[in-house]
Amino acid sequence: MPEPPPPKEDAGLIRAIGIPGLTANIVNSTVGAGIFALPALVAAQLGAASPLAYIICAFAMCLFVTSFAMAGSRVSLTGGLYAYVEVAFGRYVGFLAGVLYFLTAILAISGIVTLIAASVGRLIPILGTPIGRALLIFCILLLLVAINIRGVGIGARTVETMTLIKLAPLIIFIVAGIFFLRPEALAWPGWPRGDALGRSVLQLLFAFVGVEVALVPSGEVKAPARTVPRAIFIALGITTLLYIMIQLVALGVLGGELGKYGETALAEAAGRFLGNVGRTLLLAGLAISSFGWTTSDILSSPRIIFAFGRDGFIPKWFAHVHPRFHTPDVAIVTYAAIAFVLCFSSTFQKLAILSNMAVLLLYILCCLAALELNRRDVRGDGVPFKFRGQSIVPIVAIILIIWVLAHATREEFEITAACLAAATLLFLIRKFARAR
């Protein structure tokens, strides 16, 4: 059966994102501040066995992104995973998926912009004051808004540029550090405990997620049936190789000390073989990587507000398209304004709890949507992504997600449940208002 026709709001958007742009957007959305903090966290729990957690995460993400590719090749509406779930299961389940995504994204960008401001404030004291910090956060968000309102093509090229810039310090870290590895620091210590491994995978997924962010502007992707699957798998291969090499270098240089350094672990390792220049380079890389992540997020996440307005969950004017630049200008400004307010009430550390739980639940919905869209043979723009035994992949992915979620804490489940309850209440209120 054909995909539902695009709403008139989507018709005003321009399909300008190709395979390079979408691949760069996925890599940029994935490689953020997390990879600077998580190597030490995983090493503290697993020691020299920490690369095993990366391999499990990569395997899990391969299952997840295959499911996304299956769904994304059949639904080309703006909204990404939210649109896939809504087409498969209707407005209520789609709305829950959209709310999970939005909450995760808005809290994440708020914390990461706060991290940027804190990093810059340590280098430039005047920007470390409350007024200087607020001004810096405002200017960062204003710059990103201006870039992305002027056109999705400009936004995509900005993402491609920032992706290259942010990867440079990490690549230098790997290439230089590989000559200073200590074999004894990488010696296999034996299979880790199941609870430690499961918890490490749950935490490490924060560094791997990001595909859902990059797929939100699906309505602006050229030939999505071909572009989405190729971009997803290219990006996953790049990030997996990058992450494993970073962990091996950090572990091989610092050994058992890696777990002590937290967010500065990579800078400390670089300092061992490149001196102060290496330490400064990686500290600057943390700020650059965080800013690069925000460029992807501003390109993608405001489209969920656009999709909510388009579908009538919030007032229609949130789905306004700029008459000259053909971008969802109201959604972009609204998203940045909310992020600005939240920057003063959230921290980067607290975001990982809600982010990982919400994202994994969102992934379950998308895997189920991939099965349903395939069963109904929904078709969008082009031939859907197919392969032999494709129905098995989403099922295995869901089983793996359940195993990962089993290592979450009660508090993490309570936070997520509260968000879903609030979303359900909002949906019922909106439905009652529309009925009246």
Image (spheres, helix red, strand yellow):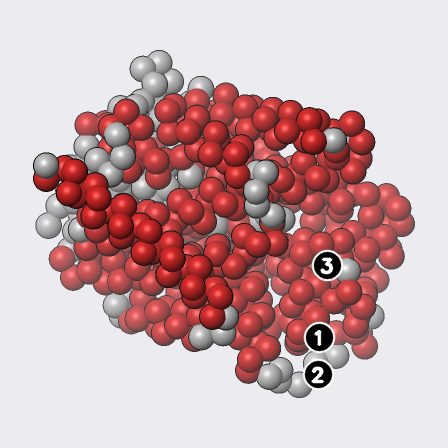
Q: Residue at x 76, y 45 (%)?
A: 283
Q: Position of residue 225 (x, y in %)?
A: 29, 46
Q: Residue at x 25, y 68 (%)?
A: 391
Q: Residue at x 24, y 38 (%)?
A: 313
Residue type indicated by callout 3: Gly
Q: Residue at x 26, y 41 (%)?
A: 76
Sooner in the amino-acid sequence: mark 1 or mark 2: 1
The reply, left or right, for residue 119 in relation to residue 231 is right
Q: Which mark is residue 389?
A: none
Res. 81 visible in picture: no
- Which residue is label 1 attached to? 48
Q: Residue furthest top?
A: 324
Judge whether 208 appears above or below 337 on screen.
below
Res. 169 visible in picture: yes
Q: Secondary structure at mark 2?
A: loop
Are circles 1 and 2 on residues that touch, CB within 8 Å? yes
Q: Quadrant of residue 308?
A: top left
Q: Quadrant of residue 125?
A: top right
Label 1 CA crowd tier, 10 Å (few <14, some 14–19, many 20+): many
Q: Position of residue 211 (x, y in %)?
A: 44, 50
Distance of mark 1 from mark 3, alpha carbons?
16 Å
- Of 371 and 203, nearer the camera is 203
Judge whether 330 appears above or below 17 on screen.
above
Q: Nearer the viewer, mark 2 or mark 3?
A: 3
Label 3 CA crowd tier, 10 Å (few <14, some 14–19, many 20+): some
- Which residue is label 2 attached to? 189
Residue type indicated by callout 1: Ala
Sooner in the amino-acid sequence: mark 1 or mark 3: 1
Q: Secondary structure at mark 1?
A: helix
Residue type indicated by callout 2: Pro
Q: Which mark is residue 262?
A: 3
Sooner in the amino-acid sequence: mark 2 or mark 3: 2
